[in-house]
Amino acid sequence: MEGDLIVLADTGKFIGAGLAAIGSGAAAIGVGNVAGNFLAGALRNPSAANAQTATLFIGIAFAEALGIFAFLVSLLLMFAV
């Protein structure tokens, strides 16, 4: 009886970690979206592309940070809880 509860808790822990890891994939989609929109804008107006490069890197950093946070949550769920 007690062993079944431990197995059930471990199963829930791994399911939660897997769901939290989806955020890493979502971050990759976000980075692609930011870079793709920058490229589309740079191709339409090449003279303004140099002024928007800093904004590109800030957007990529924010999207990547969210992916790292999701990865951290999934690791915490797997090993710390």
Image: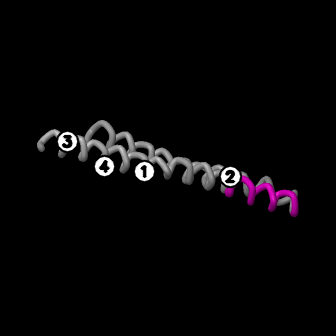
Mark 3: which amino acid?
Answer: Ile
**In front of the other: 58 or 65:** 65
Q: Which residue is mark 4?
A: 12
Quadrant containing the N terminus in the rendered view: top left
The alpha-carbon separation of the residues under discs 2 and 3 comes to 40 Å
Question: In the image, which disc is placed on residue 3?
Answer: none
**In this orientation, which residue lies closer to the viewer: 26 or 17?**
17
The alpha-carbon separation of the residues under discs 1 and 3 comes to 21 Å
First-in-chain label (1 vs 3): 3
State which region is magenta: 33-44
Q: Identify residue for label 2.
A: 32
Q: Which residue is mark 3?
A: 6
Residue placed under numbered mark 1 in the picture: 20
Q: Label 2, label 4: how many angstroms apart (C-alpha)?
A: 31 Å
Q: From where the camera sits, is residue 69 visible?
A: no
Q: Position of residue 5 (x, y in %)?
A: 18, 46
Label 2 is placed on what type of residue?
A: Gly
Q: Quadrant of the C terminus?
A: top left
Mark-to-mark CA distance, 1 and 2 = 20 Å
**Upstream in sequence: badge 4 or badge 3:** 3
Residue at mark 4 to residue at mark 3: CA–CA distance: 10 Å
Q: Is residue 46 left or right of residue 36?
A: right
Q: Secondary structure at mark 2?
A: helix
Which badge, 1 or 2, comes first in the chain's sequence? 1
State the image coordinates of residue 28 (x, y, percent, origin top left): 61, 49
